[in-house]
Image (cartoon, rainbow, N blue to C red):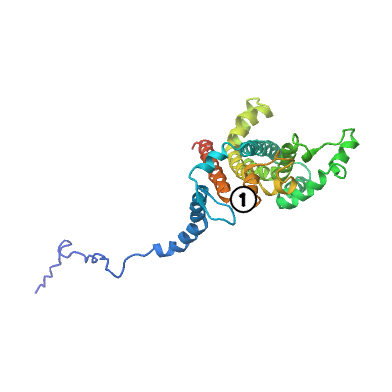
Amino acid sequence: MTITTSLPSPTAVAPAQPAPFVHSADFTPRYWLFAAPAVLVVGTVIVFPWLFTLYMSGHDWKIGGGPEFVGLQNFVELFRDARFLESMGHTFYFTTLAVVLPIVFGTAAALVFHREFPFRGLLRTVFVMPMMATPVAVALVWTMMFHPQLGVLNYLLSLVGIGPQAWVYSPDTVIPTLILVEVWHWTPLVMLIVLGGLAGLPREPYESALIDGANDWHMFRHITLPLVWPFIMVAIVIRTIDALKAFDTIFVITQGGPGTASETLNIFLYLQAFQFYKIGYASAVVVIFFVIIIMLSLLLLYARQKSKWNA
């Protein structure tokens, strides 16, 4: 006797499908609760002060009195204030020199330290040491060095037959002298950024250039500079931000003097708010300064985006 067993076809039994997930009223995602503390902190520390500053800029508000709404009067008076316009010119002058010179010297230093030579590590460590000091300490040391009678700089100049210089005590030389401090302090930062870019450059373009008979200048101009330019742009962005907000070094060395020869927007803002107690007027300066920073930031971000390598 033969027993016949019929097996079900593959299509006869369908695999069990999982039940569709149904959101219940008690399982509503509440991920925003995790972001709420950060949003609260940002709103308290950043957004609210800016809104309050914008509110104060439309008022004539002095310490000890109540605010009086004046609309755009503070902004109109600012652009009629020769001292404000002068401080704006000083800011752009200072920022331009404080960006260009460290970029040039820092790039040159990176090219030097990228080569192999004896005691390179030691010399590179010594070169970056100024960057480790705080701006106030740097300003105090340089203030003593700039002294007309007791400063070491005029003494060193006398050894080579050069007469004493006024340094920060002359309106004609005060900003270039402050730039000297900035260059000494922040050139090592630019050098480190560019040196990091040089360390990652490929060797093949240089080998091909040597075969074609290119000299050092041609290789720098047509190979090194284009390849390392994105890193230089990073250094430019960082230096521009630092130079625009420079306050401590200038204030410690000159307090904006002699007269108003080194008074930048930051110094002007500080004096209006905490020496003349014109809170509304100083708030208008902050708003204008913020607009300038936004415009420069957009320009730098555009330049940074254009400088990226094309894949």
Circle 1 SS class:
helix
Please state if 52 lies on the left or on the right of 22 as rendered: right
Q: Residue at x 50, y 46 (%)?
A: 70
Q: Residue under circle 1? A: 273
One can see residue 260 in this view? yes
What is the quadrant of the N terminus in the image? bottom left
One can see residue 199 in this view? no
Q: Residue 261: horizontal and vertical position, in percent?
A: 71, 38
Residue placed furthest toward the bottom: 1
Query: Between 280 and 224, which is closer to the camera in this rendering?
Result: 280
Query: Between 23 and 97, which is closer to the camera in this rendering?
Result: 97
Q: Quadrant of residue 5?
A: bottom left
Q: Residue 208: horizontal and vertical position, in percent?
A: 61, 30
Query: Between 59 and 65, which is closer to the camera in this rendering?
Result: 65
Residue 39, placed above or below residue 193? below
Q: Residue 201: horizontal and vertical position, in percent?
A: 60, 39
Please state if 155 lies on the left or on the right of 136 as rendered: right
Q: Residue at x 73, y 36 (%)?
A: 176
Q: Amino acid at mark 1?
A: Ala
Residue 116, placed above or below residue 23? above
